[in-house]
Amino acid sequence: MAKRPVSSLLFDGSEWNFATLSRVYDAIDAIAIDEMGLNVYPNQIEVISSEQMLDAYSSVGMPLMYQHWSFGKRFVFESQLYQKGYRGLAYELVINSNPCITYLMEENTMPMQALVTAHAAFGHNHFFKNNYLFRQWTDASGILSYMDFAKKYIAKCEERHGLNAVEQVLDSAHALQDHGVFHYRRPPRLSSAKEMERARERLEYEEQTYSDLWRTLPMAGGSSGTEEAEREALERTKVLNLPEENLLYFLEKHSLILEPWQREILRIVRVVAQYFYPQIQTKVMNEGCATFVHYSIINRLFDQGQISEGAMLELLSSHANVVFQPSFDDTRFSGINPYALGFAMMQDIKRICTEPTQEDRDWFPGISGNGNWMGTLIDAWENHRDESFILQYLSPALIRKFRLFRLSDHATNKFCEVTSIHNEQGYAAVRAALAGNYDLAANRPDIQVVDVDLLGDRQLRLKHVIKNGILLEENNRGATLAHISRLWGYEVSLAGIDVSTGKVLYECSSTQA
């Protein structure tokens, strides 16, 4: 066994102070930046209590967040589970912002403070700054100032219009926030502080002068023929840029009843939903990247003699708990652990780059044996989301290790069928099926605004594009239509249309809800 170099330890024992945190941070920084070549935002590290961590949980992890009853409800729920010992708390929380803010729990031991610093302040930080989805869809430099504006603006609305009025708008906006993001069109960058000040002044002016009566005036004349009605519908879709996938955006811009302050609240909820959009698509990659980074750094610190055997045992125990994957027949099984899959794939890429088998050379000719495992990982972190990452990098060796197989479960069949297993014939099918589970477009309802006659009956017409015969749950779709109708002000109808046949499978409206 190779002898470890003799060096002074960064810390000794479980206790910590800010001088120790600073010393450990500098050592981690040297490895992450100089040796691994990570590219990160400036770090801002804050130590918080367990109650503050619970509060951050409740407000979707944002350091500045407006008030809403659902956040308090979640705080009580999480707090009771934590106090009764049914659930632990995260050791850290990291914010995708510039500077990148990392919250450390004050109850953590010093070894854990070192691990979560490497995990969050460098692993997540690098991923946030460099992944193409985050670069395209989020504004790390503007999110904190915007959330400060949002918090103050909603508080001002509560003072001016009353808690109930603001709460009703937020309730409906939150119910629709999953359908309040742009999936293909890049949203505008967040305004600077000066621009937001001008927007606030403009909003106050609009509240005093705005009149929307002209929109509600009916068109003169009688009913038109079929051809004329079709022509008018075509003109409406052109003017309104229909179909529109972002329901909150459409309601914000075209609702006939919303006042300017209510439109701004919808925009605030949209911005928050858009901010989290990349995180939903990169859970495996993001957590895998951060876990791989902290594992590499703590092992490097140990090899350099900067952390003790006792600290390393504690760190490895925590790491093992994070990447533990229960088997399908284990009572703890709840799906594939994104930490486990992500970390295993990062480790596997390193192996393929340095010690490939013939199988690896057949499946991954571009990276097998290239020796540049860190460069390969950085390239993958920058240019993929979960679906494409799994589709390109999941190896047969890892499919065998996880014992993955594919089930065919058709509604018309009495039994499930194992159609692919981890063998030569099944690798590609298993990999494609697993990647499909992380395809957001395939697993979330596709609901679009397709038509509305602003000068006629004002009914808002929505279309649900049905894939694989999966319908919306009847009770939930009725409640959702009620929220849309509250923001629209008139009747809302929804038609479910099968994507393959074009057949209408169901129709419903807000009046039936």
Image (spheres, helix red, strand yellow):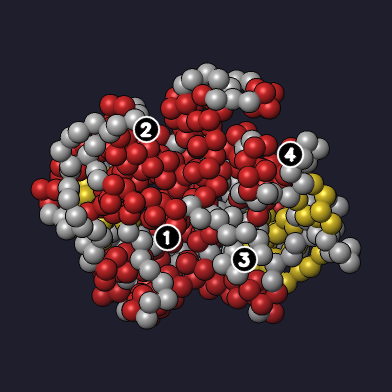
- Identify the residue at image location x=17%, y=42%: 9
Image spot of residue 191 (x, y percent)? 31, 45
Q: Is residue 96 left or right of 250 when viewed as pictured?
A: left
Q: Label 4 belongs to which residue?
A: 427
| Residue closest to the eye, 367 or 387 | 367
Q: Label 3 belongs to which residue?
A: 330
Label 4 vs 3, first from the N-terminus: 3
Label 2 vs 4, first from the N-terminus: 2
Is 214 drawn above or below residue 110 in the view shown? Answer: below
- Secondary structure of the residue carrying numbered label 2: loop
Q: Label 1 belongs to which residue?
A: 269
Q: Is residue 22 left or right of 351 when viewed as pictured?
A: left
Nearer to us: label 4 or label 3: 3
Give the CA separation, mark 1 to mark 3.
39 Å
| Residue closest to the eye, 327 or 52 | 327
Q: Quadrant of the N terminus?
A: top left
Specify the amino acid type for callout 1. Answer: Val
Q: Quadrant of the C terminus?
A: bottom right
Label 1 vs 3, first from the N-terminus: 1
